[in-house]
Amino acid sequence: MQSLLWVMRKTVIFHLQTRQNKCMANEDQLNALPEYFRVMLDHAEDISQQTIVQWPENLEGELLNRVHGWQRIRAPKIVSASARVKKKDCPLCGLAESDSKAHGVLWEKYGGGEQNLDQVVKAAQDAGLAGVNPDIAKKHFQNHNYEQPAPLGRIPAEERVKIVNSIPDRKGRVPIILVALYRHRFLSRRQIVQLLIPGSKISQSDDKTVSRLLNKMRFKHAVYEFRLPGKAAQKFYALGAYGAAYVEQIEGDLVGKAGVTKLEQISPMKLQHDISASDVFITMRCQLHDMGGQLSIQDQPYAADMSPESWWAERNLSMAFRIPGGEKKIEPDGFATLIVNDGRHLQAHLPMWLEWDSGHKRDRTIQQLINYAVFSQSDAAFQRFPQTRADGYKIPLLMVTNTPERAADLSEAVIKEAPRQHIDLAHSGPIYITDQKTLDSSVWQTGAWRSVLTGEVVEVGLGEILLKDSKALLDQNPIHAMVPIQIDPKGARPTSALSA
């Protein structure tokens, strides 16, 4: 290792002297040279072991690999969303414009795999495109037509069996992925991997397996893959048109428009909000798994988990509750449960609402929390989740905001504002708040949450908080851990949505 560092240092000096002697040298290259070699020195151990090192994004350059001396290899190019456009000189892009149905056939023939390029070429020739070869087809599907073609029209009921049979691995991970995309609305590839393999010890092979499966599902219209401007390296997924038909076979009637077929259907602001809200649930669940699926509550060990089957996101949670002169609508970001098992008497779901607060629009967030206080005194939650009905029981709300200072400020503001609106917080359901940094470290630790209703930090862990707040439910109508959470999508629907 010392000899390698010596050679590298000598190389730095040699190149600097050489560059200074060349009056034609590009000034930008000269300025970048010291950092260029600093990167090499920083990764000397990796390079000496013939490990490919990713070149920093802020530097123009390539990947470096040490194989019988220094060699340069071309850096892989990530095609951005803005670069993935239809090309005028590509016959397959032309086919997509003139005959979307024929292009859809080629899309499914390709199926996300280069081994299928010969089938694509043959199908293209059958469609009258004699000049298509495997290289043209590969470039088209990987670089040109970013958006997958949308299936035409509503999918007939008789076609659904065919669709289910065409989706790969439908008896393995596919149902989990598709149902998760329906319940969450949008998920990043990372989040999908974490939902399948919770915890922090996700192997590279697991990651590749999920990526490969998502790619195959994309070409079967089961999922819709997209990127947003400025997020070229990040992949996000929504439920595709065929995926929606598949999920409907599992879940029954779906709420709202479930299948996505165009990028225009995805609002960047809604995407960012949903991804962050889902991360609250996924992070909490992964932390439990990192803790061995164990919580200590009052010195009593409990097996604990947050099952994806108990998660419902905003698209399923638009509820109305009566107020004098009309109704108010509320849309929690998520509903989830903590499943606890003490190995003796208690095996049950402990429900909760989840909210993610971006840190903007302070007045709006204060009013949102006050609305929760009124909502919790209504019957709306029981109408949407019938199993949670119990006298005196109110589902607790957990909110994650951006900073500890905002968490304390919101709590103080709600306590001051509620009396002005004649709201009695003493009859409200429990409301707790924490911050993003605490969420990232561990929300299960003692003192991680503050009660919005009292303004005080709760000096017990989240497991004990939820167990205490669920006492009325556990005494009257406990939901056994083995019983799935039931949702009534029409329960407490807003008047404006009844005709939808």
Image (spheres, rainbow, N blue to C red):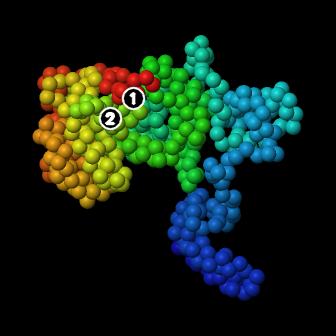
Q: Residue at 47% of width from left, 33% of height from top?
A: 181
Disc tally is 2
Q: Identify the residue shown where x is 14% and y is 41%.
A: 424
- In percent of width and height, residue 313 lies at 38, 35
> Does residue 305 show up?
no
Query: Could you tell me if the residues under marks 2 and 1 are in contact, i.e. CB atoms within 8 Å?
Result: yes
Density class for disc 2 (Cα within 10 Å; few <14, some 14-19, many ≥20) is some
- Residue 496 tag number: 1
> Splitting the image into 4 quarters, where does residue 133 fall?
top right
Give the label, 2 or 1, closer to the camera: 1
- Residue 286 in picture, x, y percent from top left: 35, 42
Of residue 325 and residue 210, the one placed in the foreground of this image is 325
Mark 2 vs mark 1: which is more N-terminal? Answer: 2
Amino acid on which the number 2 mark rests in the picture: Lys
Q: Nearer the viewer, residue 433 or 208?
A: 433
Which residue has dot 2 on it? 329
